Amino acid sequence: IGNVGGEPYWSWYGFGSRVEWCACFVDWAMNVSGHGDQYAKSSNNAYTPTLVAWFRENKRWGSRDYNNITAGDTIFFDWQGDGTVDHIGIVIGRDDTYVYTVEGNSGDAVKIKQYNLGNVAIYGYGLMNY
């Protein structure tokens, strides 16, 4: 929490210079937690729409109103509301009102955030099925 610039994450993923690094952070976190084998690394892509496609193809997708999200699932956002996924984070918890996340490249930093479960920017969830 608090890293700015994301260098350890985008360089770990294999990029030689800074990129939009939210997916690189998620991939790094999944791997260091020992769950990289269950994650979409097989897509070999840090592009969030490709990751959504991977979760859907592998029947591990939850729509934005999916109720059984759990810590470790991924959360995808569409900030502009144009149907294109812009950002990914990791769910760290939820209650009856909010989903709590840890995200890389949130204002170019790693941050803990919370969103109302009905937030229209939530596109859906990649389910890790632990």
Image: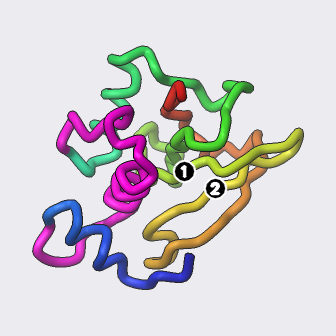
Which stretch appears magenta?
Answer: 15-44
Mark 2 residue element: strand
For the point 20% across and 71% down, which residue is it?
A: 11
Mark 1 residue element: strand
Q: Are marks 1 and 2 in contact (CB under 8 Å)?
A: yes
For the point 67% across and 32% down, which residue is it?
A: 69
**Which residue is at the front of the view, 80 or 32?**
32
Left or right of 100 on screen, residue 26: left
Q: Residue furthest front?
A: 34
Q: Position of residue 10 (x, y in %)?
A: 26, 68
**Which residue is at the front of the view, 3 or 122?**
3
Query: Which residue in the protein does label 2 denote?
Result: 101
Query: Which residue in the protein does label 1 denote?
Result: 90
Left or right of 116 on screen, residue 88: left
Q: Is residue 63 above or below residue 109?
A: above
Q: Is residue 95 above or below residue 9?
A: above
**Amino acid type shown at disc 2:** Thr
Instruction: Please state, as top left, top right, bottom left or bottom right, where the C terminus lies in the image.
Output: top right
Which corner quadrant of the image does residue 75 belong to? Answer: top right
Q: Of callouts 1 and 2, which one flags the residue occurring earlier in the amino acid sequence?
A: 1
Q: Position of residue 35 (x, y in %)?
A: 41, 41
Local crowd at mark 1 within 10 Å, few (<14), some, or many (≥20)? many
For the point 44% across and 78% down, which residue is it?
A: 108
Q: Residue furthest left?
A: 16
Which is the main secondary structure of the residues drawn in magenta?
helix
Which corner quadrant of the image does residue 100 belong to? Answer: bottom right
Residue 28 on the magenta span: yes
**Amino acid type shown at disc 1:** Ile
